[in-house]
Image (spheres, rainbow, N blue to C red):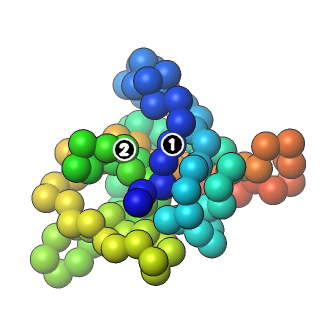
Amino acid sequence: MTAQLDDMPAASACSGSEVFALRVLGTSMEPEFMEGEIILIEPDGLLRDGSFVLAQHGGEWIFRQLCQRANGWTLHALNPAFTDRPLPDLAAVRGVIIQKALPGRRRASKRYV
């Protein structure tokens, strides 16, 4: 199971460089990202080892940490109950998570760039 994100049709309707928000569903990115938190994604964000990203993998949207390994890139789940997924190239990455927030709790916000 992967972290699911709601409102993907609305997100894909945004222009290429427009930041958009999604709600985290699932537990694959715990403990850093909890279910119900809002993440902000920048489609043109700088990709680097360790970035949290939104990507298309196996026909679904997936939210993971981008990790560079000796044999290439992987999409890494922070929750050890979920397996890493190999990434043939970075073309599948659609954006970089730049911030998270818990709805209704302004001070619970955290930036990633």
Question: Residue 40 at what x, y percent from top left?
Answer: 58, 42
- Compared with residue 67, is residue 39 higher up or lower down, i.e. above or below? above
Dot 2 and dot 1 residues touching (CB under 8 Å): yes
Residue depicted at 61% across the width and 61% down the height: 33
Residue at image mark 2: 61
Question: Residue 2 at what x, y percent from top left?
Answer: 42, 57
Disc number at residue 45? none
Residue at image mark 1: 5
Residue 107 appears left or right of 47: right
Q: Secondary structure at mark 1?
A: strand
Q: Secondary structure at mark 2?
A: strand
Residue depicted at 79% across the width and 43% down the height: 103
Q: Nearer the viewer, residue 97 or 60?
A: 60
Residue 51 visible in the snapshot: no
Name which residue type carries label 1: Leu
Q: CA distance from mark 2 to mark 1?
A: 7 Å
Question: Residue 113 at what x, y percent from top left?
Answer: 56, 55
Please rate how many residues cluster around mark 1, counting C-alpha atoms within 10 Å: few if below 14, some from 14 to 19, many from 20.
Answer: many
Residue farthest front in this picture? 1
- Compared with residue 91, is residue 7 higher up or lower down, i.e. above or below? above
Name which residue type carries label 2: Trp
Quadrant containing the N terminus in the rendered view: bottom left
Question: Residue 42 at what x, y percent from top left?
Answer: 48, 39
Residue 74 appears left or right of 89: right
Label 2 vs 1, first from the N-terminus = 1
Residue depicted at 81% across the width and 56% down the height: 108
Residue depicted at 58% across the width and 49% down the height: 24
